[in-house]
Image: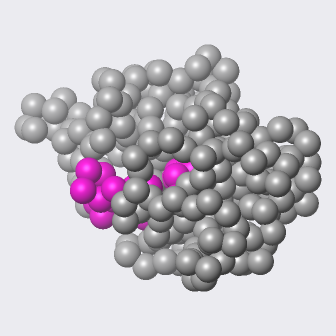
Amino acid sequence: MTYTFFLDIDGTLLWGSRSPTEELISVVTEAQKKGHRFFINTARPTSNIDRKYFPIDIFDGLCSGCGTNIIYRGETIYENILPTEVLFTTVELILKNQPELSLLLEGTNAIYYHGINRNWEGIRNIPYSSVAEIRSLFPGIRIQKFATYDRSFLTNQTAEMISDRFDTYFHKNYTEIVPKGYSKGKAAEIVEKLLCIPHSSTVAIGDSLNDVSMFEYCATSIAMGNAPDEIKVMCDTVTESAAHNGAAKAIARLCDISYQRISTFV
């Protein structure tokens, strides 16, 4: 069987660095020669994957923003960009209710941020102060989802006010605000249908709570050794931690590749 892998980034492919290890890249490259396919499946927006450090082009595809933008072999095959009026209305409502929020608008080309006291300005990080400013300066803005930052959380009241269009996920240090129905599991489902992939060949590898929908959807689920216990017990198998190249080793086992040979070679 040839597999289609859906891979989380932080805590799965990356551990203490901004780039995957040479072993991982070698295993993926060899597996691709056998017909296996690899999709990065991340909650990060497309603009938050820096190709200078993360060699996204070695993978077959990218599912970003919880499935709101999907690229396959260099071509966008699916996207759900927020309509501008929905974007403006939602940001206005959130900031009216919680003006203190560190609210990020996460897009395909840039991240627009509000209320964050750090020097983030640059081509991919753009500050904004109001909806009026966004309307005026960024009429073609392309936003996939929202997030709060720096332990700045949406209240339950605010979440309820936007619940007709958005699902809200509360994490330890931030809140994630995603168009209704989208998740890493939804991303895997979209790819499977668009590329006519047998469901039995789908494999999810991840380490955290926002990988749960991906684990639940894919036919095979693999937890990283650094994942919390509640993640490990729901998965089919547990590999080693990201610090010990657990993802590369799990891929090698499934694809019948000698990790020991790869590790020695590189």
Location of residue 204 (image quadrant)? top right
Residue 208 vertical placement versus 25 (above, below) = above
Q: Is residue 158 left or right of residue 103?
A: right
Q: Is residue 83 visible?
A: yes
User: Where in the figure is residue 147, as x and y percent of width and height?
Assistant: 64, 49
Place of residue 38 in the rendered image (x, y in percent of width and height, measured from the top left): 41, 56
Q: Nearer the viewer, residue 126 or 22?
A: 126
Q: Give the quarter of the figure containing the N terminus.
A: bottom left
Q: Give me the residue at 35% from left, 31% from top.
A: 15
Viewer-nearest residue: 100 or 81: 100
* Quadrant including the C terminus: top left
Image location (x, y in percent) of residue 259: 23, 34
Residue lying at 40% horizontally and 47% vertically, measured from the top left: 119
Direction from residue 74 to residue 84 in the image, left or right:
right
Residue 47 inside the magenta-drawn segment: yes
Q: How many numbered circles does the render carry?
A: 0
Residue that lies at the very extreme toward the bottom in this rendered image? 139
In the rendered view, would you say 225 is above or below 123?
above
Magenta stretch: give its range. Answer: 41-63
* x 65%, y 50%: residue: 103
Left-right relation of 93 to 120: right
Q: Is residue 16 above or below residue 117?
A: above
Image coords of residue 6 (percent x, y): 50, 51
Q: Is residue 165 left or right of residue 175?
A: right
Q: Residue at x 56, y 55 (%)?
A: 113
Q: Measured along the vertical axis of the image, is residue 53 above or below residue 229?
A: below
Q: Is residue 37 visible?
A: no
